[in-house]
Amino acid sequence: MVKAIDEIRNELGGSDDAVSTDDEDLKAHGFSEWSSVNVDVLPVAVAYPRSTDQVSTIARICHKYKVPVIPYSGGSSLEGHTAAPFGGVSVDFAFMDRVLEVREADMDVTVQPGITWSDLNLELEKRGTGYFFPIDPAPSAKIGGMVATNCSGTNAVRYGTMRDWVINMTVVLADGSIIKTRRRPRKCSAGYNLNGLLVGSEGTLGIVTEATLKLAAIPEHFSVAVVPFPSLKGAVSAAAAVIRKGVPVAALELMDEEQMRIVNEGGATRPRVWKETSTLFFKFSGTEGTVLDNIETVKALVKPFGPDAFEFARDKKEQESLWSARKESLYSLLALRKEGQILWNTDVAVPLGALARVIEESKSEAKSLGLSVCVKGHVGDGNFHENITYSPRDPIEAANTEKAVKNMVKRALEAEGTCTGEHGIGYGKKKALSAEVGDGTLLVMKMLKKTLDPHWILNPGKIFDP
Ligand SMILES: Cc1cc2nc3c(=O)[nH]c(=O)nc-3n(C[C@H](O)[C@H](O)[C@H](O)COP(=O)(O)OP(=O)(O)OC[C@H]3O[C@@H](n4cnc5c(N)ncnc54)[C@H](O)[C@@H]3O)c2cc1C
């Protein structure tokens, strides 16, 4: 590893800006406060490339010395994705954060991997394009990591997941060679779908150095409704009723009573205080007429489930603060932890008909184990998150947390669901993936990995083991 680092430093210009071995830097890249899992080992260096050619140089050298390469974009992933269980070089795209080209007539944009989706949207707004990029995971998430996790977010019920928005990618392979997955039309049936293979591959098959993404038109009008229910089951059943009728809501989120308490306590929407009970958040978008129509339809559909109210954010500022309180609720949970506590934040997704039962059973098991648990989710897609705050030094609490998470995943799989709807497998969910897909499918994945990365240097220890 020492030889590889020296060679990378020389070829990238010899400065400390290009390769860092500073302890704080290694810790910032190998450990994550919000990740459900961490490992005891750190990367031995962090490289900061400035171009596709420099990424290729890093890969070529690491391939020669068989040194692990861990791509790192926003660092917001949640299952130990950016951990370095075998040491190696973390490759941070902080200096590859440019919008390379916006093509308004084609409704697409080419970017480097180190730009956040939120900065991309600011740039599109600044240029007055009338477009936006709709995939919205953590505000700090960057395109490289978003592609690699096939992330989604609150907008997925309307706009789909990352996979639906990638037109092509420039990718550096394990040996340093550079490929482009395809050209730039919106449709393409030419050959194997390498976008499909690489999106969601978590940095284990290739390193994304450029991506061309589709853009969406910004809707004319928005409205955000907050609808509290007397029970969790009522809220989830109401959400399913809205989806089954095909109402084109822009987002449909669930927050349980504990999450609502955290929104109130965080004060993002002060002086307004929300009822602390299971609550659905609806985002409506379109023309003023379609938004009003959709609101009326949704009101009628949720009525049989006995909502306590149907309130609206009063203005754009309240809409935005409510939505950011939802998006950043994980950070609020982190801020409210007691000394020594950590957070296990994990997701599953199930077919819509099983959602209410799987959420209720999972939450009540965690509660019966005495855990501090809250549930939120992109329920319009059958996807929910359980957040458990616990003390890892308390062996009983730690074991109970693991049991609750394991059983939630088991319940999701038994309902023909998945162990993760959006966060991915990373280091933490390898066993769950194996249970989900079975040996035959896992073997095909391993064969693909071996073909593209024979020395197993790209983000080793993630998704599955050799
Ligand atoms: C507050 C909060 C809210 C969140 N909300 C959501 C949500 O609503 N929906 C959702 O899906 N997720 C959510 N997440 C999880 C996270 O934001 C997503 O997984 C996101 O896609 C990660 O992007 P990143 O840039 O932070 O990636 P990183 O954490 O840097 O990396 C993630 C993975 O991608 C790989 N990688 C990074 N860059 C590249 C590259 N250039 N080429 C190849 N591989 C690469 C890494 O090796 C790693 O395996 C949330 C997280 C937080 C902390």
Image: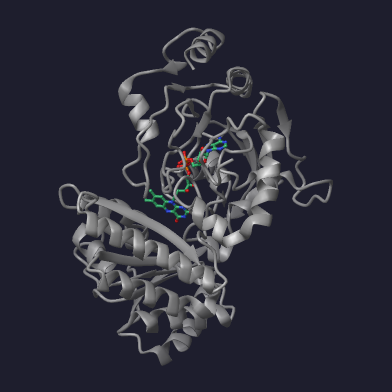
Residue at the image position 66 percent from the left and 23 percent from the top: 176
Query: Residue 128 occupies which quadrant of the picture?
Result: top right
- Left or right side of 73 for 22: left
Outermost residue on the left side: it is 339
Q: Residue at x 37, y 46 (%)?
A: 35
The answer to which of 447 and 323 lies nearer the viewer is 447
Residue 104 visible in the snapshot? no
Q: Could you tell me which residue is drawn at 35 percent across and 63 percent down?
A: 403
396 with respect to 256 (left or right):
left
Looking at the rendered image, the quarter that the C terminus falls into is top right
The number of numbered badges drawn on the structure is 0
Q: Position of residue 183 (x, y in %)?
A: 77, 40
Q: Nearest the camera: 387 or 238?
A: 387
The image's colouring method is one colour
Name the residue at the right extreme: 190
Relative image position of residue 216 (x, y in whole percent): 61, 54
Residue 281 sits above or below residue 21 on the image: below
Left or right of 106 in this view: 87:
left
User: Where residue 192 sits: x, y (%)?
Assistant: 79, 46
Where is residue 369? Give x, y as percent. Answer: 26, 69
State whether residue 198 appears in this view. yes
Compared with residue 287, is residue 202 higher up or lower down, i.e. above or below? above
